[in-house]
C-alpha cells in the first residue's frame, strides 16, 4: 500500500509540474546565450571582395579592398598621375565579389555624395556593362552562394577642380534589395 501511495503521489506531482511549466505564464525570463563570430579580412568574409586590376585595386594592410587612381608619373614609361578634369573615366573589370554565404543575394552600392568627383559602380560583363549604376533601386542580378559578380567603376570629373580627393563607398549585399543598412552612429 505504501508503494501505491508513493507512485500516485509522484505521478500527480509530475503532472502538476508539467501543467505549471507548459502554461506559458512567465512574467520574467533572462536567458544569456553566447554568440561566436570572427571578423576576417575581405577575401575570407561571407562576401569576398577581390581585386581584378592590380593597377588600381589591392588589399590594404588591414585586409580591406583599397582603390588608388593616383598613378605614379614617369617620363620613361609614360604613365599618368591620375584622372583628368572635365572627363568621364570607366575602369572595366576592376574588382569582384563572391557570395560565400548561404543565401541568394543582390548587391548595390551606397555612395558618399559629399565628394567633389562623381563615382559610380556598374555590374561588369565582358559582353556588356550594366546600364545603370548599382543602387538600391537598381541592384545587381541575384547571385547564388559561390557565384561571382564583377564590377566596373566610373569617375566623372566634369565639375571637379584639380586636386586630391578621398572618399568611400559602401557595398550592400541583401537577400531583399529593398533592405538598407542601419545608419552608423
Image (cartoon, rainbow, N blue to C red):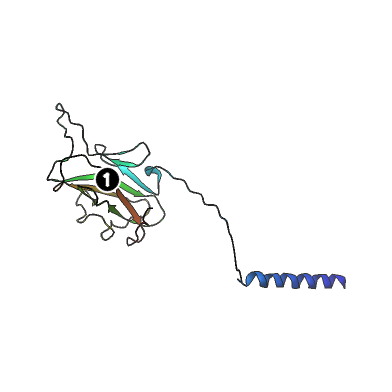
Give the side of residue 74 with respect to residue 17, left or right. left
Residue at far top of view:
76
Q: List x then y, in percent, for residue 174.
A: 35, 57
Above-or-below relation of 178 to 98: below
Give the side of residue 110 with respect to residue 23, left or right. left
Nearer-the-camera pick, 4 or 28: 28
Q: Which residue is mark 1?
A: 167
Q: List x then y, in percent, for residue 73.
A: 18, 31
Above-or-below relation of 136 to 115: below
Residue at far right of view:
1
Crowding at label 1, few (<14), some or many (≥20) Cα neighbours within 10 Å?
few
**How many numbered marks have been drawn onto this rendered protein structure?**
1
Give the side of residue 57 with respect to residue 86, left or right. right
Give the side of residue 60 with respect to residue 30, left or right. left
Residue that appears at 26% across and 48% down? 151
Above-or-below relation of 114 to 26: above
Residue that appears at 59% across and 63% down? 29
Above-or-below relation of 50 to 110: above
Q: List x then y, in percent, for residue 154.
A: 20, 48
Give SS at disc 1: loop
Q: List x then y, in percent, for residue 2.
A: 87, 71
Nearer-the-camera pick, 169 or 133: 169
Nearer-the-camera pick, 78 or 163: 163
Identify the image quadrant of residue 43: top left
Position of the N terminus by quadrant:
bottom right
Amino acid at each position: 500500500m505504501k508503494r501505491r501511495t508513493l507512485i500516485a503521489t509522484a505521478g500527480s506531482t509530475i503532472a502538476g509540474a508539467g501543467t505549471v511549466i507548459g502554461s506559458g505564464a512567465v512574467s520574467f525570463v533572462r536567458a544569456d546565450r553566447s554568440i561566436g563570430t570572427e571578423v576576417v579580412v575581405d577575401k575570407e568574409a561571407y562576401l569576398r571582395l577581390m581585386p581584378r586590376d592590380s593597377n588600381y585595386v589591392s588589399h590594404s594592410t588591414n585586409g580591406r579592398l583599397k582603390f588608388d587612381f593616383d598613378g605614379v608619373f614617369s617620363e620613361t614609361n609614360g604613365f599618368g598621375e591620375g584622372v583628368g578634369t572635365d572627363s568621364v573615366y570607366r575602369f572595366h573589370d576592376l574588382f569582384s565579389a563572391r557570395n560565400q554565404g548561404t543565401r541568394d543575394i543582390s548587391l548595390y552600392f551606397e555612395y558618399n555624395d559629399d565628394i567633389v568627383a562623381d563615382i559610380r559602380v556598374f555590374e561588369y560583363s565582358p559582353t556588356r556593362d550594366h546600364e545603370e549604376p548599382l543602387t538600391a533601386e537598381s541592384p545587381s542580378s541575384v547571385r547564388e552562394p559561390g557565384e561571382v559578380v564583377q564590377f566596373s567603376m566610373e569617375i566623372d570629373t566634369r565639375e571637379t577642380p584639380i586636386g586630391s580627393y578621398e572618399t568611400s563607398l559602401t557595398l550592400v549585399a541583401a537577400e531583399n534589395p529593398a533592405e538598407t543598412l542601419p545608419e552608423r552612429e
